[in-house]
Image: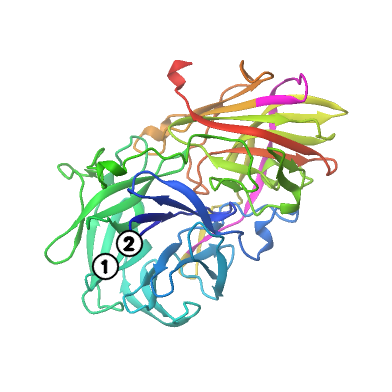
Amino acid sequence: MEVIRVGEVYYMSASSFAFSPGAPILRSENLVDWDYIGHSVPELPFVSRFWLDGNHQGAYGKGIWASTMRYRKSNGSFYWYGPIQGTDKTFVYTARRPSDRWTLLASIDKFYYDLGLLIDEDDTFYLAYGTKAIQVARLSPDGKHEIESRVVYESEEYLEGARMYNIEGRYYIWLTRPYAGQYALMSRSGPFGPYECRQVIKDILSPIPGSGSPHQGALIDSTSGDWYYMAFMDGYPGGRIPVLAPVTFDQEGWPEVEADYSESPGRWCLQYSHPSPESNHRRSSACFKRHLFKHNALDHCWEWNHNPDNSKWIIQDGRLVLQTGTLTDSLHLATNTLTHRVVGPKSMATFCFNISELRDGDRAGASLFRNESAYIGIHKEKGVSQLVCVQDVVTAPRSVPVGFMNGRPVALDWEIKSNGSVKAETTMAGDQVWLRIKADVTPAFSHGYEKETRFAKFEFSFDGTYFDQLGPDFALTNEAVGYVGYRFAVCNWATVALGGQLSVESCDVQAYDVNTE
């Protein structure tokens, strides 16, 4: 993730992989409460694999990995740089405001892996990037191409996640050693060094049981002049979880992350002082809300599974209408599957559907979407709509998820492993149905918790009030493959012929307590 401050407002940019639009942007006034406001990449660029057109097995695992964002004071614009897996290029997008629709400024014929952008005080663009050989590139005044690049530090350890800063005349490159170490390079002589290296964090435990160590984030200064480190923890099956800790600098200028180091390994504290005055404390509405689809655009918390076919969906008359856009037997290869992150530790999504315009062979419903997926929905055959629970729908890397080429990690190809099987079914009673998914995504990823299994339930209702479970509890995978956690999703695809459509009348995303059921 990348975090920056412009005036009194903070902005976060995050990875999104093959989902579209990409590189979501969140806004905060206090570094704690965040709201989605847009995306830096309106559509993943130029490569056919980012559209599910029936000619390939998708781009899962590829797309937008670590990227970087900065504000340029001289022209009042925001810049986003991202090397997109599945291409050999780095793409540059700009906007006057982060909530605007961003535009493509340039594509650079070089893959700056895990890059960090610095727009220096003299308005010069620099990129820090690389793995064992950390390099700094100076770009042209317009930021569109490279002028020069130099190796500034070489390490026997694998390092990544570069972020670059000029703090009071000292240049820093902030680096992660996956998945627990943090290093800082510091130069007192300019952006090209020479750099000294110091290990800031050797090993540190997460404040949330079951999640991985905080790593690979960004330094950010508050409006009061204090510094913080925003990192993320691997918290599968739910995905990555952001955490914040104070940072101080010693007399020599080296950063220190505040944590409990009384024992080895250290531990990220469970609680810190709030970074903003009490008047700025509020609860964000980004997570739990009701979506009624009354506007012409989707809320920014929604992302398609790949680039959408925009001719096959519309918001009209207070409904989201999804027309079938793909002939396939696979959920993972169906275009225009619309996703919303599952909010941890436990949350549920309730969709209200009208299925009157489905056609024979159509598959439509609500999915718990990841590499190992399941759904509750409608299978229509010979004019009869059957409500089904389908589980064990799997897409996965053909061999390993990530290779190593040209000195950097490369996302490798995936393929469909299983289209799943029907675990339970019942007859539909009319054209309107409420489908609900309850998911427990409490972290179960590391430090012994990976032996635990989290589950989800699929429920239905014909009146919106009384719900019954359909099918057995679904066991969630807690592996990190693809780096994306589970998402709620709405899907509609054809197995016989295009032309059918699903109407989504509402979606409620809420917290729930499994212990009260």
Query: In the image, which residues are magenta?
Result: 409-434
Q: How is the image coloured?
A: rainbow
Contact (Cβ within 8 Å) of mark 1 with mark 2? yes
Q: Residue furthest right?
A: 382
CA gap between label 1 and label 2 equals 8 Å
Q: Is residue 474 above or below residue 299?
A: above
* Residue nearest the observer in this picture, 403 or 151: 151
Asked if the magenta segment contains residue 73, the reply would be no
Q: Is residue 278 above or below residue 51?
A: above
Residue 503 shows in the view = yes
User: Would you call the spot at circle 2 few (<14 residues within 10 Å), some (14-19), or many (20 or more)?
Assistant: many
Q: Which residue is mark 2?
A: 175
Residue 396 percent location from the top left of the image: 60, 46
Instruction: Locate residue 516: give its quadrant.
Output: top left
* Residue nearest the observer in this picture, 3 or 28: 28
Q: Which residue is mark 1?
A: 185
Give the residue type at disc 2.
Leu
Q: Looking at the image, is mark 1 or mark 2 earlier in the sequence?
A: 2
The residue at 38%/75% (across/down) is 126
Residue 405 percent location from the top left of the image: 51, 67
Say what secondary structure mark 1 lies in.
strand
